[in-house]
Image: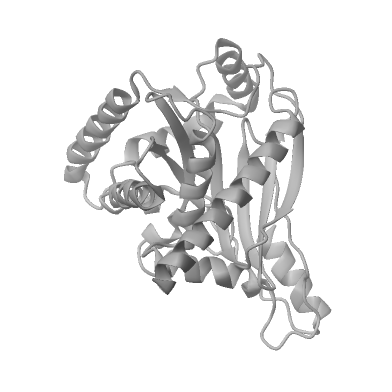
Amino acid sequence: MVQLQCAIMAGLNGRPITPCPLESPSMLPAVLPRRWQDWPTSIAAWWRALQADKRAARGQRVLSLATHRSTEFAPSTVRHHVLDTSAKALRELSKALNTSSNTLLTALMAQTFLAMAPHDPQAVAAIRISVDLRRYFPEGQAPQFGNHVATFVVRATHQPDLAAQIASLDAQVKAGLARFERREHALPLLLYEWLPLIGRTLYSRILLQAKRQGSLEQVSAHFTNLGPAEFIHPEGAQLKLTEMWPATNGTGLLIGALSLNGRQLLSIIHPRDEYPSEAVERFVRDLGQQLHQLQGAVALRAAA
């Protein structure tokens, strides 16, 4: 979709549309060990990390906006939201807190979830984060076309303050990305790429069965950030987009973020049968309050 929008904006601005070569959609070059003798180390590291994640999650209660668990997949509802805080102010706030806008937004979402259970020590906001795999392809081989993305989950528990929460999530994000650097996700992504071999019908039945049994991994939300979207305009463009709202179906709460024309935009997608719109509205309102409180605290600290 981004490729299409870039081409449309180029055409509308009288520019030639950049040709895109035919490419293999495989993500394996980004994750496979560089040498065959590295496979045992990669698999062993993945297994140790998997078991460590299971131990860390044991006894925790994943917070969710869902009011019940459905046994079927259902249509999604999309909520468009513009943060009151500008994209520039968000970047400045992130810099003041020695973190990135992505981690700051993740921490604010985590704090918003955790505020639902302020006295529950077992409460956790489990947030799935998307990772663009293009950076891990061998030099010169990163594909231009397609959605080459993997994910991992960060788990936010109650912390003394937001600074501690940011530090915790920042450490988890760095550890998660390091696993991609070390190519420890080779086996699960290899199996994922082989899924089409079993056929679409059987694959769908497996997913439906997992949904009915409640065996899909429970997370509070899936957060994916496109970042600054000005790249969609050709250089010197006279005609520009004023808004862009990417969205897709999700099996749970899916939050997509991007900034455009100085505004921070959020697309909030949720299955309408499990997630009431009222709960999503409260989440958006509380997220804004968390952000405003943080801005006030940072401003006071700077003035002191």
Residue 225 image point, x, y percent? 55, 55
Q: Residue at x 67, y 76 (%)?
A: 18
Residue at (45% x, 34% y) in the render: 126
| Residue 223 seen from this side | yes
Tell whether 4 sits left or right of 154.
right
Name the quarter where the C terminus is drawn: bottom left
Looking at the image, the residue that sits furthest to the front is 304
| Residue at point 33%, 41% (across, down) | 186
**Residue 62 % position (x, y):** 47, 26
Q: Is residue 155 above or below residue 240?
A: above
Q: Residue furthest top?
A: 213
Q: Residue 269: give x, y in percent of width and height.
A: 69, 40
- For the rendered model, the colour scheme is one colour
Total marks shown come to 0
**Lateral position of residue 287 relative to residue 29, left or right:** right
Residue at 40% x, 38% y: name it: 156
| 53 in relation to 59, above or below | below
- Nearer to us in this view, 57 or 134: 57
Q: Quadrant of the N terminus?
A: bottom right
Left/right of residue 231 with respect to residue 294 in the rendered view = right
Whether residue 137 is visible here, answered yes or no, is no
Residue 203 in picture, x, y percent from top left: 58, 23
Foreground of the two, 131 or 12: 131
- Compared to residue 52, the image places residue 36 above or below, namely below
Q: Nearer the viewer, residue 253 or 88?
A: 88
